[in-house]
Amino acid sequence: MSTNEKQVARLEGVFPAKKKDGTPFYRSSLTYKTKHISLGSYDTPEQAHQAYRMGRLLLAATYTRLEDYTEGNPLNFEKWVVLLNFRDNDIYIGTPIYVGQKMFSYYLSPDKVLKFDMDDLFYFSSHKIMQRGGHLFVADYGSQITLYTRYGIRPYAVEGVDYTFVNGDKLDFRRQNLKVVNSYHGVRPGRRGKFHARIHLNGYFHIGTYETALEAAIAYNKSVDIVRKAGCKKNFLQNYIEEVSPRQYAEIYFQIPVSDNVLNYKG
């Protein structure tokens, strides 16, 4: 064993490893309440050891809080949240979740904290929330799924039109705070409680105005079928209707009127 290897071996919580190209790096980990916890990978053994020492201190110092995290900490912020939650709530969760009273917080960063109902704890304990370009999504069954989809908000829905945050907090995903106004593609609320349906071809085509969102959604589906038969190759998202039986759907579908612009469309 070389002198360097002997020095690394004396550093508690440090485990040497190599990348595929042979470059050395160092893993840091600790065990708490019989749970083995990885703290991350580091370029030097000293950095890995500092992360280990900070992890031990954090688990022992009950006065340390989430907001005490500072830049330059040997632990990354995600691990800081994980360890504090384990210490305070006696539950290990691998994602940056801190469990509170009747809700939990998901820490994307020290300054960006999402709020969820306890009913969502199991799901987000095993699904990491990612953000890109202001969008929030999770990886599920090999696909990237927008966070809003879990709450019945369709992709490309418009805040203030299709859904609203009741208390104005756009990071509060508790169900009592999310009000879904419209969950259908191609449908917009109109005046006097009616609903407009439209389809985007070369610009938006007005399909019609209907008494219910359900009728407008079926009219949109019918219009998609019409323009596809006319040669339109656009990949439209259609509405999945669960509120009525297949027979009722067919009756509405064949009876619902759509605009001449749609009926006369030439692909």
Image: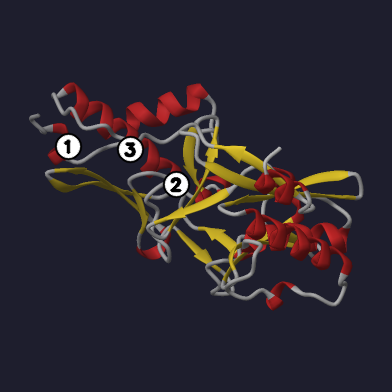
Instruction: Let me know if residue 103 appears in the view.
Output: no
Element marked by disc 3? helix
Front residue of 67/132: it is: 67
Q: In this view, does 166 lie to the left or right of 143?
A: right
The residue labelled by disc 2 is: 154
* Helix, strand or loop under label 2: loop
Disc 1 designates what residue?
262
Within-10-Å neighbours for mark 2: few <14, some 14–19, many 20+ = some
The secondary element bearing badge 1 is classed as: helix
Q: Kindly report which numbered mark, 2 or 3, lies closer to the viewer in this rendering.
A: 2
Between marks 2 and 3, how big is the CA–CA gap?
18 Å
Q: Which is more toward the observer, 62 or 244?
A: 62
Quadrant of image for the N terminus: top right
**Mark 3 highlights which residue?**
219
Give the mark nearer the N terminus: 2 vs 3.
Answer: 2
Q: In this view, does 84 lie above or below 118?
A: below
The answer to whether marks 3 and 1 mark residues whose Cβ atoms lie closer than 8 Å is no
User: Viewer-proximal residue, 204 or 142?
Assistant: 142
Sequence-wise, the earlier of marks 3 and 1 is 3
205 relative position to 192: left or right: left
- Amino acid beneath label 1: Val
- Write the residue at 24% across / 38% down: 258
Please, what is the three-letter code of the amino acid marked with disc 3?
Ala
User: What is the number of callouts on the image?
Assistant: 3
Q: Which amino acid does label 2 sit on?
A: Arg
Image spot of residue 155 (x, y percent): 41, 47
